[in-house]
Image (cartoon, grey):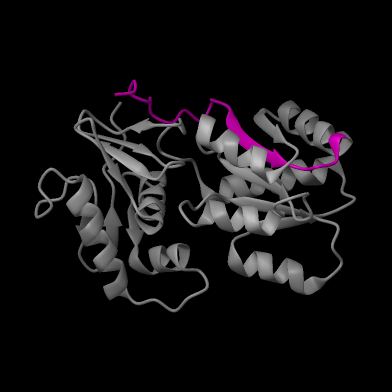
Amino acid sequence: MPEKSSAFDERSARHILAVEDDPDLLRLIRRELESAGFEVWACPTAEEALESVARRGLPHLALVDILLPGMDGMTFARKLHEWSDLPIVMLTSVDEEETVVRAIDSFAEDYIRKPFKPREMVARVERVCRRMGSFAYTLQPVIRVDDHLAIDFAHQKAAVDGRPVPLTSTETKLLFVLMRNAGRVVATDFLLRRLWPSDEVFEDTLRVHVHRLRSKIEPEPSRPRYVVTERGSGYRFPPVQT
């Protein structure tokens, strides 16, 4: 089993995944964000970015160009959001308003039009980070919750008492949202919007996924330790152990 991750420390570096195929612009993005205190994972393609996530774990935010060689930025963002709720800011030189609106409706927290002023980019990234809040656990490739449970988001699996347990995309994303807000009640309506942003899904569907997730990760599914129901409100993941 991996070493236990420490609780989130707001003084620690926030990790930004920057995906941009223009090498000069990618260097500028990295320089400006690092000057603002971020740690930047710079990737020229979506394919390399996916490999980086699998190797390093999830960042706190992704800054993604829409027009990338190979896999485009929209496809890349959708892939990430199949199993996580990672905040994404899109970089675009596309003048079509419909493209930007579709990105905002589907997954993006914000967008930045090229050419942009570096200070504006940093300000927008900072604003999204503040709005989304701090992830309760340090974002390592494998996050150790306690002696019983560890989560590997990028590979969509858990380790339960050292035994590998595959998770569905929805179960992984549900855990991501709950663990990001560990110790706080996450409202049912909020979970429905974050898990299925483009679909009309009702509370019964969420209950089914919660039941299946509990059957995989809970020592006693009928007495949940991790995905706790707060009646009339939503669900809560236990606070970080320090």
Taking the image as drawn, is residue 17 in sight? Answer: yes
As for residue 21 lying within the magenta part, the answer is: yes
Q: Main secondary structure of the magenta part?
A: loop
Q: Residue at x 54, y 51 (%)?
A: 80
Left or right: residue 185 compared with residue 222: right
User: Camera-side residue: 35 or 153?
Assistant: 153
Direction top: furthest residue:
3
- Looking at the image, residue 103 sits to the left or right of residue 95; the answer is left
Residue segment shown in magenta: 1-23
Q: Residue at x 49, y 57 (%)?
A: 82
Q: Is residue 233 visible?
A: no
Percent x, y of residue 41: 66, 32
Image-based side of 124 in relation to 115, left or right: left
Foreground residue among 180 and 63: 63
Residue 131: percent from left, percent from top: 56, 51
Q: Quadrant of residue 112?
A: bottom right
**Quarter of the figure with the N terminus:** top left
- Residue 121 coordinates in the image, percent (x, y): 78, 45
At 82% from the left edge and 31% from the top edge, which residue is drawn? 27
Q: Residue furthest front?
A: 70
Residue 16 percent coordinates (x, y):
64, 37
Q: Quadrant of the C terminus?
A: top left
Residue 220, compared with residue 12, is above or below; it is: below
